[in-house]
Image: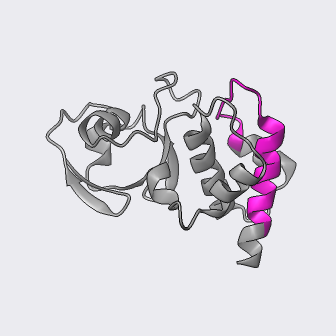
């Protein structure tokens, strides 16, 4: 299997039915995407594949072959944060932090598709990303701040 992850080409000798999440974490040692539920209901494993937010626990290695994958590690850098990452810090969104990489990846996708989201847009797109700590109000505020920052950039 060949795929590009965060701009780097990788080849992994894995079974085609292995979940992309395990390829990323176990084979490529990319730890940002997390295992949450394994059934695409929590969003902790969200990555971008060919520009679309997907649940990597439900994408097979075979389906990801040849794809361009971006994880939280490829979204921004410590020296140049993505607007969503910067807003997450500004609004102190994270508590335990377990779901945050998936939340951020989903939010970045939302803002790519809907640069000026309403509360309804945010609730609809982010509804599949669960936060056990319940930071949803801060998540919404951070998304709106990131949208404003992206408009000004």
Q: Which residues are magenta?
A: 126-148
* Color style of the picture: one colour
Residue visible at 76% across and 54% down in the picture: 90
Please state if 115 lies on the left or on the right of 9 as rendered.
right
Q: Quadrant of residue 103?
A: top right
Question: Which of 72 and 15 lies nearest the eye of the viewer?
Answer: 72
Question: Which of 118 and 90 lies nearest the eye of the viewer?
Answer: 90
Residue found at the very far front of the displayed protein: 79
Residue visible at 65% across and 34% down in the picture: 128
Residue 34's place in the image compared with 10, above or below, is above
Total count of labels: 0
Residue 86's place in the image compared with 34, above or below, is below
Magenta-span inclusion, residue 88: no
Please state if 60 lies on the left or on the right of 90 as rendered.
left
Q: Most prominent secondary structure in the magenta stretch?
A: helix
Residue visible at 49% across and 24% down in the picture: 39
Please state if 5 lies on the left or on the right of 15 as rendered.
right
Magenta-span inclusion, residue 128: yes
- Image coordinates of residue 79 in percent, x first then y, are 53, 66
Residue visible at 46% across and 39% down in the picture: 33
- Image coordinates of residue 110 in percent, x first then y, are 66, 54
């Amino acid at each position: 299997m060949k795929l590009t992850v965060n701009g780097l080409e990788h080849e992994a000798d894995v079974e085609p039915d292995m979940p992309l999440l395990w390829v990323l974490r176990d084979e490529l040692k990319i730890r940002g995407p997390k295992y949450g539920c394994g059934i695409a209901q929590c969003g902790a494993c969200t990555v971008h594949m060919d520009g679309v937010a997907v649940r990597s626990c439900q994408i097979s290695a075979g389906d990801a072959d040849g794809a361009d994958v971006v994880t939280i590690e490829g979204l921004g850098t410590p020296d140049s944060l993505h607007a969503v990452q910067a807003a997450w810090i500004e609004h102190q969104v994270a508590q335990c932090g377990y779901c945050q990489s998936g939340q951020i990846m989903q939010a970045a996708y939302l803002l790519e598709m809907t640069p000026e989201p309403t509360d309804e847009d945010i609730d609809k797109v982010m509804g599949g990303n669960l936060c056990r700590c319940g930071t949803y109000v801060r998540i919404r505020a951070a998304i709106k701040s990131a949208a404003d920052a992206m408009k000004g950039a």
